[in-house]
Amino acid sequence: MTEPAAAFHHDSTSVRFTNAIESYMTDAQRDRADALAHVHGTTRSALTRHFYDSTYTETFGLIDPTFVRDDLLPADVLDGLLAGDLDWQDVDETFYITDATYVETDLDELATPSTPTPEFHRTVGSADLARPGLTLEWDDLKTIVENHDFDDPTTAALEIHPDRVEPGTLKRRKKTSGQALAAMARVAADDGVVTRGELIDLVLKQLSPGNERHDEVAGKDYLVKEWVPVVGDYLYESPDGSEFFTTFTALNAHINDAVEYGLEQATVDDDTMTLLSVGDWLEAIDWSGSRAEGEQQWEKQVAQWLDDVVEFYQTAQAFPELVRCLDIPVDDRYDDAHDMCVEEASIAYRIAIRKLDQRRAGVIDETYPGNEEARRDLAEAALSE
């Protein structure tokens, strides 16, 4: 048995859709529709409405549907549109939609028009968007971002799987595109963390198409300089700028771990004093190699310890309120956890400066530069006491 289908006919002037679309579905058609609705995380009716919108827009763009419905388009124009020989943007603008209920007036949006059904987007939940699935167009992303409540702390962070967004889809709308890129970064992140390099790769992959320049290097530099800070505003940047935490939960977990480890490193004890003396350290580890090689290993260890203390200080200074809220014991000498972290880091660095002679300190700084600005800030704080 032949299943009911849309009938077509061709007359002497144009190709037309007839009204012969059957008003019922066979069991096979219903099962297929239910399957599509399931994999796209929506309802059958919403998927159908989305199909109507996308199918019409693909052929007719912003042409007023009443002109099509009432046969008011010139026959050659209609034939060309249906045959794919004519782009809707080449049709006289007098046939375009003018009703504000149909389309927004943002002219930049007209380049790739679409009339998405809001219900379709609401039905595709955040959990579904985080998985591979239906490719999202610009208007889809715009609606998703607009409908997400970013101000509600109980709302899960928006996540969009990068495979759902074809490179070149995003526009130069910093709020929408920035939020969309941040949502993609959350899916691509490793345990809630994405490195600056990974974020740069994501920005270049998504935004390079359509933004090509004669000087390719300059074009990439522009995108990185212009867009990484935009996306970073919707994430949580680490104090040294090397990585981004994609959710508040990931940030808080990092701060807790960093403070716990930092306090351990910054606490000045016998091990610390041994480390700051090359002779004592070589003796403690029972070094059997040459003195020169031993001193190189010692310098490397001291540099790593200094960087640990500096990172600890940076974390405390960058997120004072979050550090104050940590559930850690606070020494009676300090007002709160933040004051304790800052002061412990300053004490450790001050002792290091006094224990290391200027020559050795200079060699360490030159050989293992680390974060020079952060080291300088902590040194100033330590010496001001």
Image (cartoon, rainbow, N blue to C red):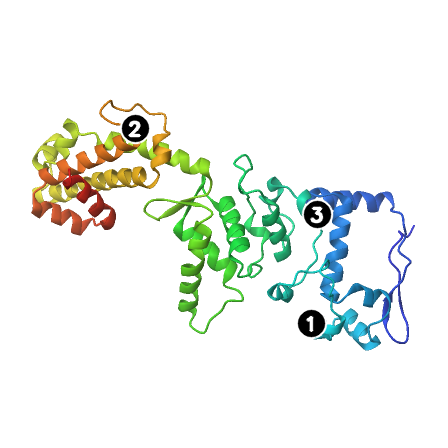
Left or right, 305 with reference to 61: left
The label on residue 68 is none
Q: Which residue is mark 3?
A: 120
The label on residue 89 is 1
Q: Secondary structure at mark 3?
A: helix
Q: Secondary structure at mark 1?
A: helix
- The image quadrant of residue 21 is bottom right
* Mark 1 surroundings: few (<14), some (14-19) or many (≥20) residues within 10 A: some
For the question of whether residue 200 can be seen, the reply is: no
Q: Position of residue 154 (x, y in %)?
A: 54, 34
Do the residues under discs 2 and 1 have CB atoms within 8 angstroms? no
- Going by the numbered disc 3, the residue's amino acid type is Phe
Is residue 42 or residue 175 the one in the foreground?
Answer: 175
* Mark 3 surroundings: few (<14), some (14-19) or many (≥20) residues within 10 A: many
Q: CA distance from mark 1 to mark 3?
A: 26 Å
Left or right, 230 with reference to 104: left
Q: Position of residue 28 (x, y in %)?
A: 83, 45
Q: Residue at x 36, y 29 (%)?
A: 326
- Going by the numbered disc 2, the residue's amino acid type is Asp
Is residue 330 or residue 112 the one in the foreground?
Answer: 330
For the question of whether residue 372 can be seen, the reply is: yes
Q: Which residue is mark 2?
A: 336
In this rendering, which labeled residue sits more in front, label 2 or label 3?
2
Q: Secondary structure at mark 2?
A: loop
Q: CA distance from mark 2 to mark 1?
A: 64 Å
Is residue 308 or residue 131 the one in the foreground?
Answer: 308
| Count of all numbered marks drawn on residues in the image | 3
